[in-house]
Each structure stands twice: as structure tokens, then as C-alpha cells.
Amino acid sequence: MLEAIHILSTMTSTMTLGAALTDGSFPWLSVVTFAPLLGVLALLLIPREQVSALRNTALIFSILVFGLSLGILLNFDPNPTEAAGAFTFQMMEGPVDWIASVGISYAMGIDGISLWLVMMTTFLMPITIFSTYSAVNKHVKEYMIALLFIETAMLGTFMAVDVFLFYIFWEMVLIPMYLIIGIWGGEMRIRAAVKFFIFTMVGSLLMLIAILYVYFQTGQTGEHSFLLADFMAVDLSFKEQFFLFAAFALAFAIKVPLFPVHTWLPLAHVQAPTAGSVVLAAVLLKMGTYGLLRFAIPLFPDAAKTFAPYIAVMSVIGIIYAALVAMVQDDMKKVIAYSSVAHLGFCVLGLVAMNPIGVAGSIYVMIAHGIATGGLFLCVGILKERRNTMEIKEYGGISQQMPIFAGFFGLIMFASVGLPGLNGFVGEFMAMLGASNSNFLWFKDPLVFVRGAEGFSLTASPVFPLPAGEQAGPELTALIFAVLAASGVIFAAGYLLWMFRRVMFGPLENAKNKVLNDLNAREIAYLVPIALMVIFMGVYPKFFLSRMDNSIDQFLRYMDSNVSATGSVRTEKTDQSEWVPEGTILDNREDGR
Amino acid sequence: MLNALLMSQFSALAMLRPPTGVEFTAIIPAGIAAFTALLVILLDTFHRGDSGRGYLANVGSIGLGVVILSAWMLWDKSLDGAAFHGMLYLDKFTLIFAVMVSAAGILAMQMSPAYLKSHLMDRSEFYGLLLFSISGAIILAGSADLLTFFLGFEVMSIPVYCIAGFLRKDSRSAEAAMKYFFLGAFSAALMLYGIALIYGMTGTTNLEYVSQSLATTLMDPASATSSITIIAFGVLLILSGLAFKISSVPFHLWTPDVYTGAPTTGTGFMATAVKAGGFAALLRLFLVGFQIPELQGGFFGYGWVDVLLFVAAASMILGNLVAITQNNVKRMLAYSSIAHAGYILLGFVAASARPEFFLFNDTVIFYLIAYTFMTVGAFGVLAWFGRRGEAAETYDDLAGLGLKYPLMGLCMGIFMFSSAGIPPAAGFLGKLYLFRAAVDVGASTGEFIFIAMAILGVLTSVAGVFYYLRVLVYMYMKEPTREIRPVATRGATYAIVVCAIVTLYLGVMPARVISWGNQAMVDFKGAPAASHKVIEEGKQRLEQLEARARE
């Protein structure tokens, strides 16, 4: 009798849990975010001598987090009932009072923009941790703790819906990354770590003041709040928007990194250990672009319109400049680091194009770049483990010695170059297409400081006063951006292929390279998921795009109604066939001939 | 008018009655601390043999634990007026400072036994002096009269002079004690002169009467012009005495030398409890006694608010910039404590600029609590890493220790990230809370100087990031240069871990402590009449929040 009751009660409890998993009452987001911290607790209990137990525990927890994050993906509704404002968050948790007297609350949510960033993070973390099994031998415990800690912070950054919560997670990311670079990095690791930290900190503190300023404009009744929705409701004058956007955009531009503030990145990448580079390139940089998309642009739409062409200029300069610099590097990691700057340039260009294809392409670049560049860093890390050097001239003819490695490296490298059929192509092509027919990237009446009777003031005034007929219209400007960016793709093919040829092909001359072993089972095991994902994202982008379409559409409609220069935002919804070239073959087939 | 006021006071004095029983609760917290100090001295006379005196630290800690317990029991029993004919307040404000300094005392005491032993100075006086100093700080926080204020001030300060020179065989410690004592005595004398001037102008030492009398004097243009100089001079002298105690800029010169020379755990105590006591006195004196528009000034109306604005800005800039160039961690922490004094002053200045911002003073309380735990902890780690007869002082001494002693490394990491103001540690929230108050005051009064000060605070704290991170660079990213045998008892380790846990707790779940700060300001006795309206609103808001939390 007792047993029967017991079984019944467990059955009902599992059934209610089972129902809860899908009906929205299970806190998927918080569970996924904080599950890595459970892993940290488990690691703390394991003695530091048991290195393999530490590694396996960290790996198991990161796989567990990936498994849990599939729950988010399965519960995600691609066509949700639309909420007011710029974003429709699903699976909302909270807002729960956190520090009630200041109006800080705990609120998590997810939409089509953050979904894939979250998935990419959880997908890459087990791979990253698996790759450190032989690379890191000192202070393994601390390393694993740092990696799991940073996973929590990154996931929280992408899911926070309260601006203060976002800021906390955003800053929390710095601590483990600083330690990862500084403790396990290369020779100049201390300089790299401090530079990374100070650069990011300067930007984020100015953003903090800007956040506080907006915070005081919320809730005119005296109850201020940090919720994103309340921030959106604030009505700001153009002058306020101008400075607030500048503060936000500086913080995000440093993180991306955009052209003039990118100098911390190559140093940090080269000095960081492999896992650090992967996390840095794949996820940390995306926090910058994500921040632009989620906070800076929708909070200050008019200022975004003013700044957009300048941001586009910086990203195009970044694309070309980084490609040229990458060509002359002797160090493989530096080549990949500069290629990151270039790829992120496409991402930002697509973002400020402010039309469905551009923004979708931008988000796609974020994910694709995360997977492909993460993979490239892993491949280079494999070489580094064997030879302990990154110098290109130390290598040559490696493909004879390591054929399987050559296959993986080549595939991922082509994905990064942007070969059609692999994931790099889709996003970059869409971003360029978006930029080429954007109405947003137009230097009409740039703002300048003009000395008037009452001191300096911001005034719209053309820098090159041309007659109206001779001003380049939005179409031409956008096209120039797209054409310049496209030349960056050619450069990318140049530097990556050239690096690949010098490392993998040619005569096998260096005696030290003649004894290299090909990939072992562990290395194959963590490169296979990346290779599969690279191909899958390349041939079936619809799987990813269909889940972000609604969010992008809503975001653009919000921008359209909030930017005072009407017609600058293009909001026609894509059905993903728009960017498929129309040709006779397709047309003929549809005619049924 | 003035005469009538004085007469009313004298008639009150004339009807001297013995204090009622309930008034004696006002001296309970300070009394317990002083009693424990006597107990420690008494116990020591029975000490025989060479066994260590670490147990006296436990006796002292238990005594301070009872102080905290008494604060908890008296929390809702604050007295309406000042006890003992206008001498001592007992309100939540006093109690929260009693808890703060007692906690600092417990932690410093628990960190001390092994440290003192390794310096061959294992003597009971250290604990007795700490306890006396704590009782002084508690009296200071509750002072309702310039005389109790001065009494508390000296009872707090004199033991600390002795603590600074406690390692008497060490010439630097002797130097620290001399320097601290002479400068401290000088500043106390200045302050006493200021008190005399104020007494001369008002004829009373009771703060509330001082406030009324000053307001009356300054309201009348004729008497105002004749007396404003002397009054302002008196206020300025009192201000400089307090600025010395909280080590803010023009009066900071003693700080680096004294902090370096004093025994490390004692430094941790004087950097936190004495500073907290100084701020408690600052709040009491200036909010109760001198909250008068003519004296306050404001945005460059040349009152004490403007003076403090300058002091805060100078402390933030100088403290942070000079700290960068230090090679000695204790000196670095000394300069950083000057910078922290600047941040806290910014909060106080913003809150006291107008009566309607009165409640923003809770930012001062919250920051002080956060600062107490992270600073005592940091000094504790330095003491922990000492070697027989010498403490870890320079950056090189710390090289490589973070990974060798992971627990201490982690704790020091938390303290440094917290001091640098990086989430999720307490220091970040404290700074945010301060800057929020400053930005709010600036936005609602339209006085840009407060927003500018917040931006200055943010920029200088970027400089702060640099030198705090340097500690971690040495601890984690350099190879060890020397062997150490940690001079630490289990109590020291626990105390440091507790500091780290509290620092994190305050950063992640600060709501409760913030609400304590709010309650302390709402319950602040002797608040000026102009602030009563905000205080009533604050009370209602607290009740609302409690109701919301209960749901």
C-alpha cells in the first residue's frame, strides 16, 4: 500500500515536471545560465591533484548545459504573439525584485536575436573544454573553474532583460577572461591581460553613467527602474540621445572591436591560451555586436541614424585594413585575430544597414564567425601543442604528415574565407546585400559643432555643401559601402589561403615537423561537431534564419516608427527567397517545363 | 530670541532630574565594549607562563559579538530624544555604526594573534586598546552634544595611536605612532578650538540647540554679518579635525606612513573602524548641527558643502593617482583608502546639499559597510602572507602566492575586484549607489557639478582598476620569489573567508543591508525640521517595500 502511494506520488511529480518543462513554468533560462556555476561548486570539491577528474567534471557539466539549452531551443516559439516595443521576449522569468529600493530586478528573456548566440555559446563550451585536456597542465582546477564561470557570465549577458543585470554579467565576463589570459597565456600575457581589462573597463564605465542617466528618466512618478522595457519607454531629446548613444556605442565598439579601438584584440588573442582565444573570438566579441543591436540602437534610434554611416565607415575601414594587416603577419594567431576584426566589420555593416537582410546577415555572421573562427583557433592550437610555436615559417608541408588535420583545417578555413556552401558565405553575403540597398547609411546633413551666440551647439550642416542634385543619394552611398566590403572578401581569401598554403603545403623541410603525429581520437572528436556545424549552417541556413525572422521584423518596424527620418529603415519582411538569385533554371522549373 | 532660547535651555537644566531607567540603554553598546576591554586587562593579570594570548582575542570577539547582539535587540527601541539631558542618541544610526565597528574589531582581532606572536609582541594590550577604541567610536556615532562628540573622538583616537606604535622594536612603527599622535593631537586641538568658537557664539554645546541658535543668529542680517566669520571659522576647524580622521586630502599626509608602519591587522582596523567613526561623527555633527542654508553654501556659495566638494574631488584624484606609483601594497592601500574617503564624501555632499536629499545619506552607510569588509580582509591577507618577523608588504612579496594558496588568493581577488568596483562584488554596488545619488541630485537640482563629480569618480576609479589589478598580476601571474610560512591561526583564515563571503553577499544580495541603511537614516534623531517631510516619505516607502517583499 505504502509503496503504491509512493510510486503514485513520484509518477505525478514526474508528470507535473514533464508538463512544466514545456508549458513555460520551468525556468529554462535561469537553469541554463547558472548550471555552470554548479559545475564550479563540483570542481571545488575535487582535490587539485586529480587532474583528469577535474577535466571530466568540467566537460560533463558543459555538455549538460548544452543539453539543457536544447530545452530552450525546443520550447522556442518562432512565431510568438507579438508584444509591444522593439522585442518580444519569450520564456520571460521575472521581473523579480532584486534590490527593490533602487528598482533593480532580476529578469531574463530570450528572442530570435539572442537564441542563437546562447546556443552557440553552449555548443562551443564543451568543445573548448575538451580541447584543453592536453594543452593546459598547470593549475587545471583554476582553469576549469574560470571556463565554467565565464560561461555563466556570457549566457547571462545574452539573456538579461534588465539593463543593470546585463551590465553585471557584462562586467563579470572580464574577471575570468583577465585571469585566463594573464595566468595561462604566452610571454607578454600580463600586458595583454591588463590592456584587455583597461580598454573594456573605460568603455563600460562610461556606459554605466549613460545607463544611470536613462534610469533617472524612467518612471516619471519617482519609481525608477532598470528594466529594458522601461528604458525603451523613455522619451529623449536628440541631444541627449547623441551623447548617450556615443557612450553606449563606445563600450560596444571596443568589445566588437571596431577599427580605431581594436588594438587590444590582436595582443589578447596571441597571448591567450587556445581556449581563451576560442571563447574570446567566438563569444566575447559578439557581446559587442549584440549590445549594439539590443541596447544602443533601439534605445537611441535617432542618434543611431546619425551615427550609422560613420559606424559603417569604421567597419569598412576595419574590413579592408584588417585584411591588409593580416596578410603580412608571421604569426598564425595574429592572422586569425585580424581576420576576426574583418569579419566583425561585416557583422556591424549588416547591422547598421537597417533592413531585414542586413540584420539577419549580421546575426548570422555572429554565429558563423563564432563557429568557424573558434574552429580555426582550435586547429592552430593543435599545431601549437605539438610544436609550441605559431610562426608560419616554422611550418610547411604539414599536410603530408597530418592528412586528417589538413582536411579539418582546410574545411574550417574555407568556411572562414566564405566559400559558398559553408557557413561563412551565407552571413557575409546577406550582410553585403543588405548594405548595398540600405537607406540608412546616408551622410545627409552630418552633425557638427557650430559656434553660435550661446556657445557651441550641435547643428545639422553639410560638410561638403553641394547643390541638392549633386549630393550622392542613399542608394549610391550604400552601394559604395557594399562594394568596398566585397573587396574585403577577396582579401580574406588571399590571406587565409596564403597562410594555409605556407603552413600545410610545400616541401616538408623542417626536421621537427617530420615527427608530428596526426590527430588523435580526442582531437577528432571535438573537431567533428564543428565541421558538421560549418556544413549544416552553410547548406540549410533556413533552420536558423526562420527562428530569427520575427524578432528582426519587429525590431525593424520599431526602428521605422521611431527614427524621425522616415523611409530610412526598410522593413519589408524577407521570406528568405529574396536573396536567392533569380535565374532561368529556377523559373523554368516553376513553369513545369 | 536668542536669550529666550538660552533661558529655555537653562530652565531645562535647572529642573535636573535623574535619568530615567530607559535612558541607560543608550550606553549599552559602548558600555559592553568598554567593559570587555577591562575584562581583557583583568584576565591578562592572571596569565601565567609562555602560552599564547590568542584566547584574549576570542574574549574580545565574544564581547563585541554581545555588542552586535545588543544592537539587534535594541534595533526597534531607539530613544525619542537624546539621553542624559541631551548628551547621547540611541537610534538605528548609532546601532548600525556600532555593528560596523564591532564587526571590524572582531575581524581584526581574529586576524591578530599569530601576527603579533610572529612579531614577538603577543600582548593583551592590543585587544584592550581595540576594544576601547570601539567603545569610543560607538559614543561618537551617538553623540548629541559637542562634549560627548569630543569625548568619543578622543576615546576612539588615543588607543589607535598606541596601536600604530605597537611594534615598538620596529622603528617604522614608532615613527608611525609619533606622526599619528602629534598630527592627531594637533587636529584635535584645532577641533576643540572650533568647538569653543561655536560654543562662544551659541552659548550651548547641545547640537540641536546649536542648530536652532545658529539659525536664529544667521536669519537676522545684522547679527549674521557680525558673527558669520567666527561661526564659519569654527565649523571649518571642526571640519578639518574630522577630515583628518577620515584621511581626506589636505589632511591625508599622515596616512601612508602610519598605515605602513602600524601592525598590519591594526592598520586594517584603523582604516575601517576609525574611518567609519569619523564619518558617523561627520554625519551627526553636520546634519544635526550645521544643516543651515547660510552655512552650507551649495554650488560654490562657499559653505561647508563647497569645501567638502573640493575635499572629495581632491581625495579621489590624488588618492587614485598616487596609489598607482606605489611599490608597497600597504602604502597603495593607504592611498586607495584616501580615494575611498573621497567617494564616500561625494555621497555625503550630494545628500546634504539640500534637506530633501537627506535620505541619500544611506549611500554613505552602505559604502562604509562594503568598504569595511573588503579593506579589513585585504589587510588580513597581507598579515596572513607574512613571514616570521616581517609582513608581506611589497608587490614582490606577494608574487606567485595566489595559486600557491588558492583560498587566500581567491579572497584577495574578491577584495581587489571589490575595491576596484567590478561586479558582482560589494564595492561595485557601493560605488553605483553613491554615483546614483550624485547623478540624481545633479539632475533634480540642475547643478551640474554633482554629475561632473560622478563622472570624475568613475574616471578616477578606472585608475583604481590599474593598481588593484596589479596585486592580482603579482599574485597570479608571476613566479613565487620567496618561501613563506603563513603566520595564521585558524581564526585568521576564517575571518578572511568571512570578509570575502560578506563582500560577495553584499554585491549579490544587497537589498537587506540597503534597507538597514534606509532605516538608519529614517530613524536618524535630531534631523533638521526641513527634512522631516522626506523622512516621512521614506518611512512610507520602506513600509511599502516591506509589504511588497512579504507578498
Image (cartoon, coloured by chain):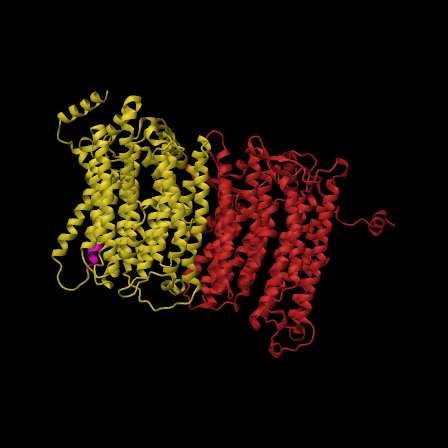
Q: Is residue B258 left or right of residue A589?
A: left
**Picture coordinates of residue B471, whole percent (x, y):** 40, 58
Q: Nearer the viewer, residue A55 or A16?
A: A55
Q: Is residue B206 left or right of residue A271?
A: left
**Picture coordinates of residue A127, whole percent (x, y):** 57, 61
Depicted A333 relative to depicted B440: above or below? below
Q: Which residues are magenta?
A: B53-57
Type of secondary structure dominating the magenta stretch: helix
Depicted A526 relative to depicted B219: above or below? below
**Picture coordinates of residue A521, whole percent (x, y):** 59, 70
Q: Residue at position x 41%, y 44% from top?
A: B431
Q: Specify whether residue B165 is painted magenta.
A: no
Depicted B455 relative to depicted B115: above or below? above
Whether residue B114 can be seen here: yes
- Dividing the picture into quadrants, the one containing residue B195 is top left
**Picture coordinates of residue A478, whole percent (x, y):** 72, 45
Q: Nearer the viewer, residue B51 or B279?
A: B279
Chain yellow in the figure, letter: B
Q: Residue at position x 35%, y 48% from top?
A: B338
**Residue with the most extreme right position:** A593
Counting the numbered discs, the total is 0
Whether residue B526 can be seen here: no
Depicted A325 relative to depicted A516: above or below? above
Q: Nearer the viewer, residue B252 or B271?
A: B252
Q: Is residue A208 left or right of residue B75?
A: right
Chain red in the figure, letter: A
